[in-house]
Image: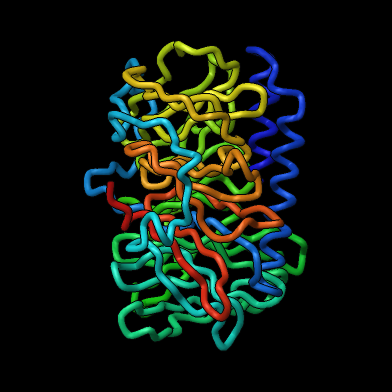
Amino acid sequence: MVEEQLRQTLERAAAAGPMPPADLLARVDAGHLRRRAARRAGWSGLAGVVVLVIIGSVALLPHAGKTPPVGASPSPSGSASGASSPVEPKVKDAAPVEQVWPQAVLSVPARSGQGTNEPVTMLDEHTVLLAVHTGEDKVVSLAAYDLRTKTERMLTELPAPPGLQGYWPGPFTAGDGLIVWSAYAWGKDGSKTFEYWSMRYDGTGKRRFRTADLGVGERVVVADGALYGGSFAGGGIVRVPLDGGAPAQVPGSSGYRLARWPWAVTAGPASTSQPAAWNLVTGERRTPAPRPLPSPWWSAADQDTWLGIDDNRLRFAQATDGSWQVTTNGFDPVTLTDGWLVGGTLLNLLHPNDPKQPALWDLRTGVVATYGTPATSGSSLRGQVAHPLAWWPSGERLMVFDPARVTP
């Protein structure tokens, strides 16, 4: 779905600006196939595969409006990124995250009684939400792992309701004390149905609060009494009220995807005239300032940081208002189509000297840290949220990287 959205965006951009590199879509499609292969390999062997999980929780914004204003007047370029003085990536000094940020590396069991564990997000400082998969990659239950006691506790099973076929729960997210997820299935008449569920962090209060024919895909967030997510069918952002109200596409959101809440940005690389960031609460809009270095394609890292891509390489990162720019030594941009900034300061990339090795570039310090092992099947990216978790197998355990624990 992510790759299809990117394809549609590039087709629209082609009519209004310079053409993208000829093999950009092929490279993205190749990355998609590698990520799918990595996922399958992870469930069967749990060896040599790295997955970046970005289905986690975005913190609740207390002043978020229930209905985003869509008629607010656009403003010129917004404020600069939190990384006010970014530093060029120190590629030659790259080291594993275990050495660079040891305080941010955690560990959970690779398997539970029902299947293979997948870290989703942190419920609190000491608790990891786990999605438990079967061999066919289907989530059959949710569990919580306590890092202090090293114990795993089942929260709920996710059985298919009667009368539905091909039941697939997910994506999952958490916020405001609730775990929220969707699931889709086909009825006996062939119609597709989407269910929306919630429960408290301790597993109590589980309820199905809505059934609808409009679904959300990955990149989801709980904010001010609603679940927001990219449209399952592509083409915009969907809002699902937690009180049982009908899901609806946010007006004017076609071509946008969620970044750091409450912001959405144009999906995929775009020509100079098209990229934009949009605050779903206030209606503010931002566009990147004129670039001092030539690059025919823009990609949004988030609402504060934009990336310049040329000849299939990431050439620079720049503040939205143009207050800073830093070159990037030509990182491979394939992961940028869905990776973006992790926590607002860590840019998820593929190492320029090893295109199979995921890496993080800290814009504040220039530090480059690799995570996991060189993944022969690539990595799997799920979307951008405030609290993503990277994980990779290590024997009978999963090593989990929590970017929220990284300090400058």
In the image, residue 321 above or below residue 115: above
Q: Residue at x 34, y 60 (%)?
A: 175
Left or right of 371: which side holds 57?
A: left
Q: Quadrant of residue 22?
A: top right
Residue closer to the observer: 275 or 309: 309
Give percent across and percent down for residue 391. Answer: 51, 63
Given residues 100 and 263, the one toward you in this image is 100
Picture coordinates of residue 196, whole percent (x, y)? 50, 63
What residue sits 56% from the left and 16% below the top? 295
Find the residue positioned furthest to the left: 63
* Of the pair 308 and 114, the residue shown nearer to us: 308
Residue plotted at (56% across, 88% down): 113
- In percent of the image, x 59 and y 42: which residue is there? 335
Q: Relative to 299, does residue 182 appear above or below in the rendering?
A: below
What is the count of numbered marks? Answer: 0
Judge whether 156 appears above or below 27 on screen: below
Spot the residue most to the bottom. Answer: 113
Q: Position of residue 383 (x, y in %)?
A: 52, 48
Colour option used:
rainbow
Mark yes or no: residue 204 visible: yes
**Above or below, 73 relative to 87:** above
Asked if one can make out residue 216 in the rendered structure from this viewpoint, the answer is no
